[in-house]
Amino acid sequence: MHALHDVPLPDDLDAFLPAVIEIPRGSKLKYEIDKATGLLVLDRVLYSSVHYPANYGFIPRTLADDGDALDILVLMQEPVEPLTIVRARALGGLKMRDDKGEDDKIVAVCIDDPAFAHYTDLAHLPPHLMLELDRFFRDYKLLEGKETVVDHPYDRATALSIIRASRDAYRPPDA
């Protein structure tokens, strides 16, 4: 099974969507899914003295503007092992730009975590948590000499629209 191509994405994204975790919360290791094999490849160890503030991965069967699957951060109590599928609810997202162009980050919660399952929109999250996410993406590439810009957060409706557009843009490898 290939995590990028073989994990089904439901038609109804309102209830939940699958998130394939590449990087556990608290890690400094930046993994990327290898599009050919479906295995994880260590891209780098983060240069800055920061760590991922949430479980980080992708939404399978999507294609974002940067040419990769759509990125997702899943908020929950515990770090998750890489290549685990987590049932997530999109709350909104962060509009980010880096040297490769626009790079949306969907912010979600694990619907199977009782401490986070009740959240339904970014506006419901503690303000400090959003500041942590924003600051992480502004800082994590600084010591590599790369700049990232976090433009603004957006709501659940916008996130779902971006997910649908990325789902529509996706083409299986045999297509």
Image (tube, rainbow, N blue to C red):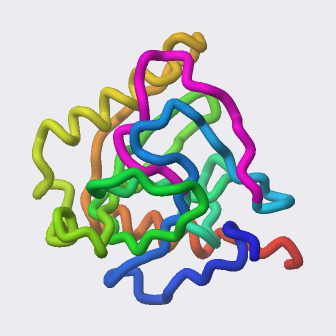
Residue 32 in the image: state x and y as whole percent.
67, 46
- In the rendered image, residue 87 lying in the magenta stretch gets the answer no
Please report the bounds of the magenta region as a residue range.
39-57
Residue, x 37% and y 46% (percent of image)? 54
- In this figure, what is the number of numbered marks? 0
Going by the image, does 158 lie left or right of 40? left
Quadrant of the image occupied by residue 162: bottom left
Residue 62 in the image: state x and y as whole percent.
61, 67
Question: Could you tell me which quadrant the N terminus lies in?
Answer: bottom right
Q: In this view, does 134 lie above or below 17?
A: above
Going by the image, does 43 lie left or right of 115? right
Q: Is residue 154 above or below residue 119?
A: above
Going by the image, does 118 lie left or right of 35? left
Q: Is residue 31 above or below residue 87?
A: above
Residue 43 in the image: state x and y as whole percent.
70, 35
Residue 170 in the image: state x and y as whole percent.
68, 70
- In the rendered image, residue 40 lying in the magenta stretch gets the answer yes
Residue, x 37% and y 33% (percent of image)? 150
Q: Nearer the viewer, residue 53 or 157?
A: 53
Residue, x 29% and y 68% (percent of image)? 157
Taking the view exactly as shown, the residue that stands out farthest to the bottom is: 11
Question: Could you tell me which quadrant the C terminus lies in?
Answer: bottom right
Residue, x 65% and y 69% (percent of image)? 169
